[in-house]
Image (tube, rainbow, N blue to C red):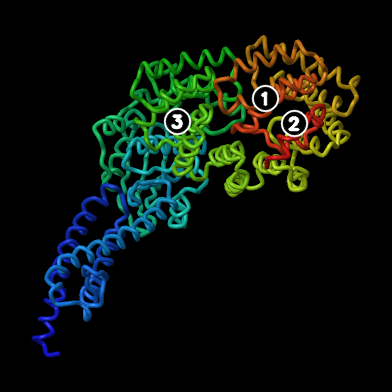
Amino acid sequence: MNLTSFFTELKRRSVYKVAVAYAVVSWLLIQIATQVFPFLEIPNWAIRLVIVLLALGFPIALILAWAFELTPEGIKRAASAEGEVQRSRSRVWVYVALIAGALSLGLFFLGRYTASNRRSATVISDNKSIAVLPFESLSEDKSNAYFADGIQDQILARLSKIADLKVISRTSTQKYKSAPANLREIAQQLGVTNILEGSVQKAGDQVRITVQLINALKDNHLWADTYDRNMSNVFSVESDVAQKIAESLEAKLTGREKKAIAFIGTNNPAAYDALLHGLALRGSQDPDEVEKERGFFRRAVELDPNYAQAWAYLGGRELDIYPTVEQREKARREIETAIRLAPEMEEGHVAMGLYKYYALRDFDGALAELEIARAQEPNDWSVFYFSGLVLRRQGKIEEALRSMQQAAALDPLNQDIAVNLASTYRGMRRFDEARAMFDRALTIAPNDQNILANKAETYLAQGDLDKAWEIVSKLKLSPKDATLPIFMGTLQYRREYDEMVRQAQAILAKEPDYPPLVGQITHAATAMIYLMKGDRAAALPYAERARRDREELRRQKDVIPGLQGFYIIMEGHLGNRAEVEREIQELFDKTRNDKWEFPNAEASAAIGYTQLGDFDRALPLIQNALTQPSALSLTTAGLRLDPNWDPIRNDPRFRKLYEEKKP
């Protein structure tokens, strides 16, 4: 074929038209990618990939146009087509080539982009992600170390208000040292690109704060500054640092965000100093440390009664560690003061959300407060975490999981989030996923006894007593966490009553005068052990002590549903119908709107009725508890193994429940 006939053949086969059409559409696709992908926060590599794929597709489209044609009789090799069809088919081939290219490209990106979404729960651009590492205290006076922690916390709080950034929580960053050498590794562990380091030196009323922003993946310094201030004018440093970081990372700030970042809570240096003292103690669950923290926040509001942030932190801390009715009322007043002083401040609405959740069990109200807080501070892990807990109580389990997963993305080294995700999977009877998440929590807190106990409980729920025992037999037992109840539950399923008695006696001998909250469950559980063992006489003194604990809790209006369930089961074993009926009614009234707790209440009530021989009332409760997710979800393995069900075990209706279903 000579050159002239070759070009004639190219024209006859519509290769020119396909080439022009392909070029035009490729240009259009590239324009769409460059304009739309950044808006959707698809990584920049995806744009480059579009260009490469379109370039690779160009010769393929030309080859297809040369080799094949579409005729009224179907697709044929070009050599076998009849000449009269050539003019009519050219436009069709343009469409075919374009559709084929578009489909290929679409399918490729669907797979790549969804895979990317599976790898990351966040949609923030990698370049706009940041972790603030602990600030180094350079003060000669070691007692000033709190100041560095507090400054870090305040800078982090302001950055968290910027929706265009992904900001890792302090809980995760506190696990690292100040100014570490391996910034790239830390950035990869936390899922960020940028890291802020800093140091603080305080001498008397003089403060020097040095900060530097680093792209940890490229080892590139983006911005640095040093602030020399007197305590009387140190308040604006955190706002200035947050603003400079946002500019360096090209984050878009709304007017509301600019106002929130610039907000200064107090102009009183002593009040500010007291707040930083309190913030340095945040996170501890030790009662003495919590009281110290409250003391600093109280001092802050005494020095500046208009210090809204300090009021919010004080009210929130009043709710920790089983608050009394008096403490709950005090918390309400303090939180309302915070919101009145600064209605747009996130901390006040978080605290009010927790108050409505823990103190009032007003789940709708709690979620509404947390939604307000989320709009004000979109990077606060605690808002997503507590929203997940509330959604779980509302029975919105999948939404709860998503919310807690968002919290985990912002605070990847927070073991509490991992444990609650695991507990949610366990409550849904998704035991493999629960154990995987408990293992994740153990990488954060190796050998944590409480986490190990909860992992063992997943095996217990499935009836795998050997694997459960392998874990619980090595635990350090305490009545103040999950270790002892799960250890005793394993012994109970194994029907090793003598060992249960020995363990109970050892614990009571160690601390005979438990407060009513711990005492009720300890004494009620000991009474039940003796009753299951068949020793009623030995059980009665412990049952009487449990009743005294119960009345004290009732007087304090501090009855927890889980403990109430223990009391129902104990009274059922003792045959006290009137007490069982009264407690069940009270428990149901208290938990009926709590979708996460109510199935547990039904299971406890079912055991109470079973012990009374009232099988007709027990069975519907068992059936419902078996089908609903809950904190301690009943399983068919539990029906088979738990001696509490022995009185109903020969009822064919009961046997049918666990013989037809898996755990």
Please identify the quadrant where the C terminus is shown. top right
Q: Amino acid at mark 2?
A: Phe
Which dot, 3 or 1, sits closer to the camera? Answer: 1
Looking at the rendered structure, which numbered label has been put on residue 620?
A: 1
Q: Local crowd at mark 2 within 10 Å, few (<14), some, or many (≥20)?
A: some
Indicate the position of residue 322 as horizontal and vertical percent values: 61, 22
Determine the secondary structure under disc 3.
helix
Q: Which residue is mark 3?
A: 276
Coordinates of residue 241 in the picture (x, y in percent)? 32, 40
Residue drawn at x 51%, y 27% is 394
Q: Quadrant of residue 379?
A: top left
Percent coordinates x, y for residue 580 in the rendering: 74, 15
In what element is the residue under mark 2? Answer: helix
For the point 37% across and 47% down, which residue is it? 129
User: Are there few (<14), some (14-19), or many (20+) residues within 10 Å of tag 3?
Assistant: many
Q: Are marks 1 and 2 in contact (CB under 8 Å)?
A: no
Q: Earlier in the sequence, mark 1 or mark 2?
A: 1
C-alpha span from label 3 to label 2: 59 Å
In primary-sequence order, the first of circles 3 and 2 is 3
Residue at screen point 11% across, 81% down: 7
- Work out whether residue 406 can be spotted: yes
Q: CA–CA distance between discs 1 and 2? A: 10 Å
Question: Relative to 544, does residue 488 appear above or below in the rendering?
Answer: below
Judged left or right of residue 537, residue 355 is left
**Residue 654 - label:** 2
Q: Amino acid at mark 3?
A: Leu
Q: Position of residue 480 (x, y in %)?
A: 70, 30
Q: Nearer the viewer, residue 622 or 482?
A: 622
Contact, CB < 8 Å: mark 3 with mark 1?
no
